[in-house]
Image (spheres, helix red, strand yellow):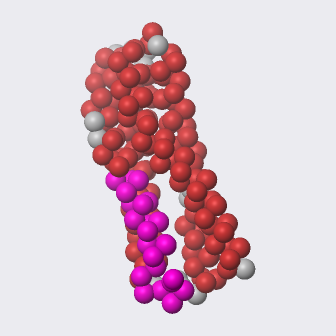
């Protein structure tokens, strides 16, 4: 059962975190281009909205990853190991970065693209939030990379290679 749960956990991680990681990384560049192009370039806006939707949907689906991971850890008997606790803390930090910084920054950009009144003020507000998005996307992706390394190396684990 543990091997099945681990396989399922890894599959869900790959299918959920991968798209979010790519979408949050691509978003700032596409958003700057769409804001600069203005309403005359609807194709640029479409890609921004799509990347924001991918980020939102896969973030929501990704909420199940920790639950599946904890179930897998319990089945493997490693629930109290330090590497797993560190992974859980880093996963919570990554979720916090996504929910508190990345998604609101993306939403501000989408709102600016949708603005019909006072578009310049909305664009200025979005541009301010957009400046931090590359950094927060990098932090989000770095946290997931560290979690991945911890899961592979499993320092101090009796199951480790």
Residue 59 vs residue 104, the one in the foreground = 59
Q: Position of residue 57 (x, y in %)?
A: 58, 45
Q: Position of residue 123 (x, y in %)?
A: 33, 23
| Left or right: where 139 falls relative to 49 | left
Residue 134 visible here? yes
In the image, is residue 158 part of the stretch drawn in magenta? Answer: yes
Position above or below: 120 against 147:
above
Residue 4, image quadrant? bottom right
Q: Position of residue 21 (x, y in %)?
A: 47, 48
Q: Quadrant of the N terminus?
A: bottom right
Residue 143 vs residue 39, the one in the foreground = 143
Secondary structure mainly formed by the magenta segment: helix
| Left or right: where 128 falls relative to 22 | left
Instruction: Name the residue rendered at 62%, 66% in the picture.
Output: 9
In the image, is residue 140 part of the stretch drawn in magenta? Answer: yes
Residue that protrudes farthest toward the bottom in the picture = 158
Residue that protrudes farthest toward the top in the picture = 40
Provide the residue span drawn in magenta.
139-161
Q: Position of residue 13 (x, y in %)?
A: 57, 60
Residue 96 visible here? no
Instruction: Name the residue rendered at 42%, 60% in the picture.
Output: 145
The mark total stands at: 0
Instruction: Name the residue rendered at 49%, 72% in the picture.
Output: 151
Residue 28 vs residue 3, the one in the foreground = 3
């Amino acid at each position: 059962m543990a091997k099945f749960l681990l396989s399922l956990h890894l599959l869900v991680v790959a299918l959920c975190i991968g798209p979010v990681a790519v979408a949050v990384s691509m978003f700032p560049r596409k958003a700057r281009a769409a804001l600069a192009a203005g309403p005359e370039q609807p194709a640029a806006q479409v890609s921004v909205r799509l990347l924001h939707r991918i980020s939102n949907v896969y973030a929501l689906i990704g909420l199940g990853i920790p639950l599946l991971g904890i179930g897998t850890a319990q089945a493997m008997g490693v629930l109290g190991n330090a590497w797993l606790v560190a992974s859980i803390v880093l996963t919570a930090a990554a979720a916090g970065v996504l929910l508190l910084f990345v998604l609101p920054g993306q939403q501000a950009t989408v709102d600016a693209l949708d603005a019909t009144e006072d578009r310049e003020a909305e664009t200025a507000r979005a541009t301010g939030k957009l400046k931090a998005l590359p950094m927060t996307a990098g932090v989000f992706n770095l946290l997931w990379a560290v979690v991945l390394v911890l899961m592979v190396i499993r320092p101090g684990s009796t199951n480790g290679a």
